[in-house]
Image (tube, rainbow, N blue to C red):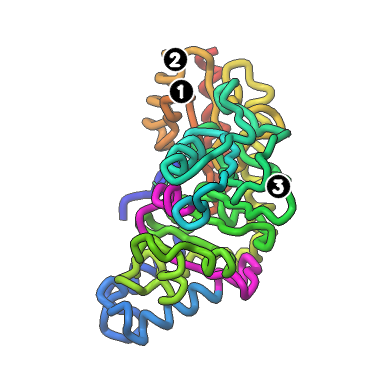
Amino acid sequence: MTERIHNFSAGPAVLPVEVLEEAKENLLSLGNSGIGILEHSHRGSAFLAVYNQTVADCRKLAGIPDNYHVLFLQGGASSQFFMVPMNLLSKGQTADYLVTGSWSKKAVEQAQRFGTTHVAASSKDRNFCYIPKDASYSDAPAYVHFTSNNTIFGTQWAADPQVPSGVPLVCDASSDIFSRPIDVQKYGLIYAGAQKNLGPSGVTLVIIRDDLVKAGPLDIPEMLQYRTHAENESAYNTPPTFGIYLMGLVFKWMLKQGGLAEVQKMNEAKAKPLYDFLKQSSMFRGTADPGSESLMNVTFVTGDETLDKRFIAAAKEAGFDGLKGHRSVGGMRASIYNAFPAAGVQALVDFMRNFEASNG
Ligand SMILES: Cc1ncc(COP(=O)(O)O)c(C=O)c1O
């Protein structure tokens, strides 16, 4: 096998090796069924067992109450940008958005097609380098939407935003889902594309409260109603079976780590050496404000685009892939999701220290 290198990709991203090993085994035959996981009918007992276990482990991991549905949808998190307002925003209502980066900006733009929106807080004034402390909500919003981790700008909400009592909180958790404990009861709906912390691209996890499912409109296409997927256990049409299977393996892996509290400890310990290094470096600096830094995507620059390019090229040569930052921030981004090994972060810090010493 080719040696695995340090993969700092923002998504699809690194997965636990033991998960990939198990999936490899089951590609040819799921257990002793004689049929590979990719080849099983989504209505057959072998796949239904996989589905049930995945849902059960998801519920256990995140402590999801019984009045919430766990759905596996398609179309990526980007499809939730319009499914959320289609289902939750009725005529005459306003939906509030906390705009902390490109993805929340896209989310609010899609919602504008279905009703009135209000930007209750934004960090656009400083190119989204911080999480706003205050928000000014509209009167009785249909819901409040926020992005818990801003993949591109390297910022993360340290705690849930405070929203007016009784207003459903909707969260795009694509890039930090299950990276720390989550109090699901505080949310009306949580969604996440799988390809960062949960598995492969092609499946989106949606956790939604039952009353919101029931209150959804009936006059939109069936595939776009949460009701359809909730009533059919995500199998109204052919679900993304491989994605569900792999997500199940990732849930099992997280449970084996000790659950979300332990995963959070791992993530904090893992990101610390990199943030500590950035604080004292005379060449590199983090782009996120203190207190807003993401444990999942660490963004940094040298302040000199030519030097950034040289660093990225040298890092790639040394086996550190995917470090180029998004064009809207520039510089570098190290995506270090749950499955990214701590040793890889330490190796990057060592490499940065050496690069600084020989190029400073
Ligand atoms: C926070 C966030 N939301 C939404 C998306 C879009 O996800 P998808 O490509 O699954 O539509 C991304 C993709 O990187 C993201 O990071």
Cβ(mark 1) to ligand 1 < 8 Å?
Answer: no
Q: Residue 340, can we see it?
A: no
Tell me the distance, in whole angstroms, between the alpha carbons under discs 3 and 1: 33 Å
Foreground residue among 85 and 197: 85
Residue 146 colored magenta?
Answer: no
Which secondary structure, mark 2?
Answer: helix
Q: Earlier in the sequence, mark 2 or mark 3?
A: 3
Foreground residue among 36 and 166: 166
Which secondary structure, mark 1?
Answer: loop
The residue that label 1 is drawn on is 330
With respect to residue 159, does 257 lie above or below? below
Circle 3: residue type? Val
Q: Which mark is residue 305?
A: 2
Most extreme residue toward the front, as rendered?
A: 92
Q: Residue 354, can we see it?
A: yes
With respect to residue 284, does 268 lie above or below? below
Q: Position of residue 348 (x, y in %)?
A: 53, 35
Which secondary structure, mark 3?
Answer: loop
Q: Which of pointers 2 and 3 indicates the residue nearer the eye?
A: 3
Q: Quadrant of ligand 1?
A: top left
The residue positioned 41% from the left and 42% from the top of the image is 113
Task: Name the image quarter holding residue 289.
Answer: top right
The residue that label 3 is drawn on is 163
